[in-house]
Amino acid sequence: MYSFNIGNNYYHGTNGFSQDYNKALEYWHQAAELGYAKAYCNIGYAYSHGKGVEVEKEKARHYYDLAAIGGDTNARYNLGVNEENAGNIDRALKHFMIAVGGGHSNSLNKIKELYLNGHATKEDYTRVLRLYQEYLGEIKSVQRDKAAAAHERHRYY
């Protein structure tokens, strides 16, 4: 998505673009309006961390919700972290589980952490391990295996 990538370039100040959070947000809004869920996640991050806008946790959550509805696993993870920080462990666990189903390994690690701390059951942890294994099975390919064998940074598992 062109406008999303331009927004990222402005955000990071890369590829000849000067760093400009406001322009990044403009381009991300364009991408989001065209249905690109990752753009909503980036907008949520900006509101969560005050990048080009004032910190507004409710707006951040709103944009994370839109991104999560669109299937963005990073947004789902961020919603889980927010719920965990608020003490809503059951809700956090649900967000993390959905993200794991989409291959989000950090969510798997969060559930492992919740399990080790007594906040998730053995069944919860077993279920997400299976979900993650199913995800890996779906994306498995000979080409990916060759790339992973040749370059450690290309691992997808």
Image (cartoon, helix red, strand yellow):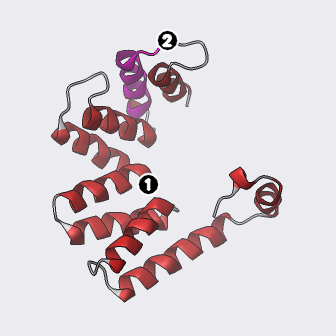
Q: Nearer the viewer, residue 12 or 135?
A: 12
Residue 137 lies within the magenta run: no
The residue stretch that appears in magenta: 18-32
Circle nearer the N terminus (2, 1): 2
> Where residue 104 sits in the image (x, y, percent)?
49, 60
Left or right: 68 as drawn, with respect to 84: right
Q: Nearer the viewer, mark 2 or mark 1?
A: 2
Left or right: 88 as drawn, with respect to 150: left
**Where is mark 1, residue-wise?**
73
> Where residue 39 sits in the image (x, y, percent)?
42, 35
Instruction: Write the residue at 83% across / 59% down.
Output: 146
Q: Which mark is residue 18?
A: 2
Q: Quadrant of the N terminus?
A: top right
Amino acid at dot 1 = Thr
> Where residue 103 sits in the image (x, y, percent)?
52, 62
- SS label for mark 2: loop
Instruction: Write the residue at 61% across / 18% down.
Output: 15
Amino acid at dot 2 = Ser
Instruction: Tell me which corner region of the image, top left, top right, bottom left or bottom right, holds residue 27.
Output: top left
Q: From what the image shows, is residue 42 above or below residue 5?
A: below
